[in-house]
Amino acid sequence: MINFNYETDFTLDNEEAVATWLTTVIISENKKEGEINYIFCDDEYLHKINLEYLNHDTLTDIISFDYSLGNELSGDIFVSIERVKDNAVDFNVPFEDELKRVLVHGVLHYCGYKDKGDTDELLMRNKEDEKLVLFHVEQ
């Protein structure tokens, strides 16, 4: 089950469509969906987590804690909406597109993809692009 939690003044407009898409991503990687919690927050909230649990004194857009067992993916994914907004401006993409990229990035980590090092980062970006195409919203 995919859950969305809010620790900031933001709400996802299309929770059901996003959850369905993320489930499709998980299935496309031959994994099973456990309990995945997305926690939307601000920079200050995520910075505290980054300091406390990872000993990193930096701002980041996403931190994921992986509780997966075997092929069943579970975990907590913290997303700073402030960072996603800033990154969207920096990368000259719509906020919604950058948000989806960050959301799928967390799931792809649970699938075993890394992003440390040029080769791993390139593979992660390619996987993100591949999975973004799977997102559909009924009009």
Image (tube, rainbow, N blue to C red):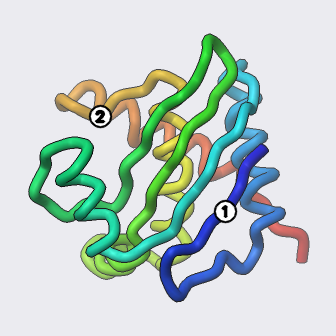
> Which residue is denoted by mark 1 in the rendering?
4
Q: Mark 1 or 2 closer to N-term?
A: 1
> Which residue is denoted by mark 2 in the rendering?
115
* Cα–Cα gap, marks 1 and 2: 24 Å
Residue plotted at (61% across, 43% down)? 131
Query: Which numbered disc covers residue 125?
Result: none
Q: Position of residue 77 (x, y in %)?
A: 50, 50
Q: Position of residue 19 (x, y in %)?
A: 76, 54
Specify the amino acid type for callout 1. Phe
Q: Are marks 1 and 2 in contact (CB under 8 Å)?
A: no
* Image vertical order of residue 56 relative to residue 127, above or below: below
User: In this rendering, would 110 be left or right of 91?
Assistant: right
* Image vertical order of residue 106 relative to residue 9, above or below: above
Q: Quadrant of residue 80?
A: bottom left
User: In this rendering, would 117 be left or right of 2?
Assistant: left
- Tag 1 secondary structure: strand
Q: Position of residue 8 (x, y in %)?
A: 49, 81
Comparing 51 with 77, the one in front is 51
| Residue lying farthest to the right in this orientation | 139
Specify the amino acid type for callout 2. Asp
Residue plotted at (13% across, 49% down)? 56
Residue plotted at (25% across, 25% down)? 119
Sort mark 2 into few (<14), some (14-19) or many (20+) by Cα contacts within 10 Å. Answer: some
Q: Position of residue 35 (x, y in %)?
A: 70, 39
Comparing 6 with 106, the one in front is 6
Residue 77 visible? yes
Looking at the rendered image, the quarter that the C terminus falls into is: bottom right
User: In this rendering, would 137 be left or right of 12?
Assistant: right
